[in-house]
Image: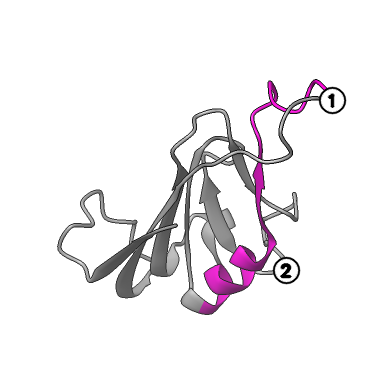
């Protein structure tokens, strides 16, 4: 049982957003009916803002392969700088044990933490 057959098994939700809309965020393993062999639901992958949810240990393991790709318009000329600045905002929400329950639409009542780097 798991997210792929309609049963939600979620204790943890995370949102990762880059402030540059040209950045693409993804997880390294493209076949995530399990990312790295575990069931994690990933939403809006390959955009500048993704969300993940699943069991805490599974989400934590999936985040090990998190990748940020620069906007495609960068690094096209040899004289361009080798780096560019951007900020990333990470929001994590502890959902408690939510087995066979849909993900709540409003997460504001759950414990959360936010960091920006």
Q: In the drawing, does residue 115 fall left or right of residue 21?
A: left
Query: Where in the figure is residue 25, as x and y percent of width and height?
Result: 60, 44
Q: Position of residue 21 (x, y in %)?
A: 49, 29
Q: Which residues are magenta?
A: 57-77
Determine whether 77 is above or below 8 in the image. above
- Judged from the image, the secondary structure of the residue bearing numbered disc 1 is loop
Residue 69 included in the magenta stretch of the image: yes
Per the image, the residue denoted by label 1 is 78
Residue 6 colored in magenta in the image: no
At label 2, counting other C-alpha atoms closer than 10 Å, the crowd grade (few under 14, some 14-19, many 20 or more) is few
Residue 62 in the figure: left or right of residue 113: right
Mark pair 1, 2: CA separation:
40 Å
Q: Could you tell me which residue is drawn at 65 percent across and 67 percent down? A: 64
Could you say which is closer to the camera, residue 2 or residue 59? 59
Quadrant location of the C terminus in the rendered image: bottom left
Q: Which disc, if any, is residue 20? A: none
Q: Measuring from the top left, give residue 109's x and y in whole percent.
A: 15, 63
Q: Nearer the viewer, residue 1 or 78?
A: 78
Quadrant of residue 100 within the rendered picture = bottom left
Q: Is residue 73 left or right of residue 113?
A: right
Q: In the structure shown, which secondary structural element does the residue marked by tag 2 occupy? A: loop
Nearest to the observer: residue 79 or residue 108: 79
In the image, farthest residue toward the right: 78
Q: Position of residue 44 (x, y in %)?
A: 52, 39
Q: How many marks?
A: 2
At 26% across and 67% down in the image, what residue appears?
A: 112
Residue at 66% in and 36% down: 70
The residue identified by callout 2 is 37
Asked if the residue under mark 2 is in contact with the one under mark 1, i.e. CB atoms within 8 Å, the reply is no
Q: Earlier in the sequence, mark 1 or mark 2?
A: 2
């Amino acid at each position: 049982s798991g997210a792929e057959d309609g049963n939600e098994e979620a204790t943890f939700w995370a949102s990762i957003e880059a402030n540059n809309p040209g950045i693409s965020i993804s997880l390294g393993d493209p076949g995530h009916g399990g990312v790295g062999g575990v069931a994690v639901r990933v939403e809006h992958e390959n955009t500048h803002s993704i969300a993940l949810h699943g069991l805490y240990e599974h989400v934590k393991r999936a985040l090990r392969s998190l990748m940020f790709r620069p906007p495609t318009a960068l690094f096209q000329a040899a004289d361009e700088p080798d780096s560019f600045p951007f900020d990333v905002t990470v929001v994590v929400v502890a959902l408690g044990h939510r087995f066979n329950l849909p993900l709540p639409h409003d997460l504001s009542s759950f414990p959360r933490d936010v960091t920006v780097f």
